[in-house]
Image (tube, grey):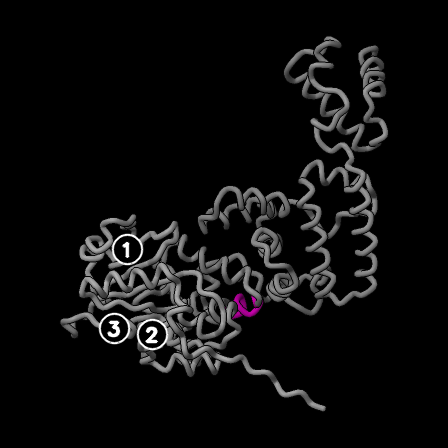
Amino acid sequence: MKKEKKENKLNLKIESKDINPGALSIIKKLNDSGYEALVVGGCIRNLIMGGEAHDWDINTKAEPEEIVEVFRDYKVIPVGKKFGTLTVVINHINYEVSTFKKNKSVPTPNLLEDLRHRDFTINALAWREGEGVIDYFNGLEDIKQKIIRGVEDPVERIKEDPLRMLRAIRLACELDFKIDKATLQGIEENSSLIKKVSPERIRDEFVKILISNFPKRGFKLLQQLGLLQFILPELEGCVGFYQEDFCPNKDLFEHIINLLNNLPPDLALRLVALLGEVTQPISNSQTSREEVAAKILRRLKFKNSIIKKVSILVQEDWRAIDFLNPKNVRQFISKNGEENILNVLELKRADIKIGKKISKLKQLEKIEQKVREVLEEKPPVSLKDLAINGKDLIDLGYQEGVELGGMLKKLLEIVIDKPELNRREKLLEFLETDSMK
């Protein structure tokens, strides 16, 4: 018997109990002060779709100075004030409170004009206590049909803020929605406008696309709509580049985005998959993968902690590492840390999946078992794990500095090779023998 496809039920009757208490109190204080105020945007969309709302946005007729006055007894953060947005903090939670957008053709700012200039119909929704959801632009129907559509004129909305081109793709990946044809066309025709957007804002949307449930779809759209060439030209260069040794019958771009789709949504791990191969089409062989990846991440204003984490794995040829040999496992952990060996296994698994090589998956199970066995043994992999320390070497006459550091490093290499030698008497015996040479 054929099962009927289960439809997601929409919550169209949002009540006060569904709204965050802090957001409700902000609306009440503004209303009591004579200013119209409503909850707007993505938080309403999420509630309608039955999800959780994390970021609460309130739009109001009050001007920024009036908002500050109403909330004079609260912490108010003025970042964004010149754009008409303030952050009101209640119980350590941030709420964005924005003045209705002004329009030269409309002397008095109002809700309709404000929502008219929001990015997409599914975000151009508002909620007022006692009235419920307000939908001027058919956003509810677009949610039902799973469509991302620019409000009224998509091109005008893009010109108001070109970041909206990335946001459309990000929402398509997060919500599993389709972008309507007019909006797609608007993005394609205006893709170069993304150059006007700051790297930090681009990075934030880029990251959300990367760690979404559908990263492959996201990067295909970025490439097809002409945005990738401006954001990540190194990846654009992988389109049409074939390397049969590890991606037969597919160009390098397709191989990389397939890899992303088969990895868990971990930022560093997906960045490694994304950036680890982009040097292949670059003719300058003097440029290492690590250097290229770091340069891209710095350009997109990633934090140094992420750059460091990604660089560790990018410099390794993770396909070639043989973890069936316990010594190789210990050496890798010593150099790169225990967490990264698990990341390499995830990369290997994803690579095998896209190659559809079942026999290699069975081999990977053996490799994982070997790695687990080594980890359970807790082998010596760092200087602090050695059975003797620097003080012991000084007592034996070694000089602090290069000589001492070099010998400790040598001892570590010995015990990584043969962990059973990591006993005080064994290491002292080696030192005595070495000093007699």
Mark linked to residue 86: 1
Establish if 324 lies above or below 23.
above
Instruction: For label 3, count other residues whose C-alpha is less than 10 Å away and answer few (under 14), some (14-19) or many (20+).
Output: many
From where the camera sits, is residue 291 visible? yes
Q: Amino acid at mark 2?
A: Val
Q: Is residue 85 left or right of residue 437?
A: left
Instruction: Give the x, y percent position of residue 275.
Output: 58, 53
Q: Magenta residues, as a range? A: 214-221
Q: Which residue is mark 2?
A: 155
Q: Are marks 3 and 1 in contact (CB under 8 Å)?
A: no
Tell me if residue 298 is in the magenta stretch.
no
Identify the secondary structure beneath mark 1: strand
Instruction: Please name the residue shown 21% across and 72% down the image.
Output: 110
Q: CA distance from mark 1 to mark 2?
A: 28 Å
Exactly how many numbered labels are in the figure? 3
Q: Which residue is mark 3?
A: 111
Type of secondary structure dominating the magenta stretch: helix
Q: Quadrant of the C terminus?
A: top right
For residue 81, what is the image quadrant? bottom left
